[in-house]
Image: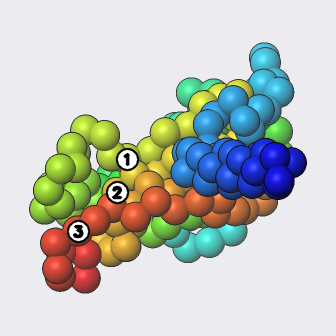
Amino acid sequence: MANGFWLAVAATGALCAQADADSKEPRFEDYPADVVTHLKPAAPIFKTGGQRRFRSMIREALEKGVNFAGHYTVAEWGCGSGCVQVAVVDAQTGEAYDGPFGALPRTHVSLIPNVEADKTGLSYHEDSFLLVVRGCPNEKDCGAYFFEWTGSQFKLLRKIPIKTPAGADK
């Protein structure tokens, strides 16, 4: 019977540890990327109408250098008051990729109680494949999104919803 008790305690501990691991946000250091230094960026290759429309903003960001996932540049530009759109460019090849959302408006977040607007937006590091998006992409489905960059697309790792008042995220 004592062995059964300790087995139950061990199983409960394992379940709690798994639940704790599941509740943690992905961290930048969990998705390391080797940074390529002294890289002269390649000319960007635009594949979509949106990329061509914002080519000046994308080129300017690329000229500033690598800021994401080792040899990529995240280009950000405004899409109205308190709004951002993004593209990712491989500084080695020039390949341009669309971001994981169309628009990320900051003003929409101000409607949500207990969410500070300055804690929204994008977070990324030059030495990590992780992109964190906090807010209401395309003015709906508010939350914290954790994406892993695969080299050609964003893979959603986790979404933590932000509780919104009824109808605020429609």
- Label 3, label 2: how many angstroms apart (C-alpha)? 11 Å
**Label 3 Cα neighbours within 10 Å, binned few <14 / some 14-19 / many ≥20:** some
- The residue positioned 77% from the left and 32% from the top of the image is 32
The total number of labels drawn is: 3
Residue 20 in view, yes or no = yes
- The residue positioned 30% from the left and 71% from the top of the image is 139
Q: Earlier in the sequence, mark 2 or mark 1?
A: 1
Identify the residue at the far front of this view: 1
- Label 1, label 3: how many angstroms apart (C-alpha)? 17 Å
Q: Does residue 7 appear left or right of residue 25 in this picture?
A: right
Q: Does residue 103 appear left or right of residue 51 in this picture?
A: left
Q: Amino acid at mark 3?
A: Thr
Residue 57 in the image: above or below residue 69? below
Which residue is tagged 3? 164
Depth check, mark 1 against mark 3: the one in front is 3
Task: Say which mark, if any, is on residue 135.
Answer: 2
Q: Does residue 107 appear left or right of residue 2 in this picture?
A: left
Q: Earlier in the sequence, mark 1 or mark 3?
A: 1
Specify the quadrant of the image occupied by residue 83: bottom left
Task: Say which mark, if any, is on residue 121.
Answer: 1
**Label 2 Cα neighbours within 10 Å, binned few <14 / some 14-19 / many ≥20:** many
Q: Of residues 5 and 160, which is closer to you in this image?
A: 5
Residue 167 in the image: above or below residue 42? below
Q: Does residue 18 appear left or right of residue 23 in this picture?
A: right
Q: Of residues 103 and 58, which is closer to you in this image?
A: 103
Q: Amino acid at mark 1?
A: Gly
Dot 1: element: strand
Dot 3: element: loop
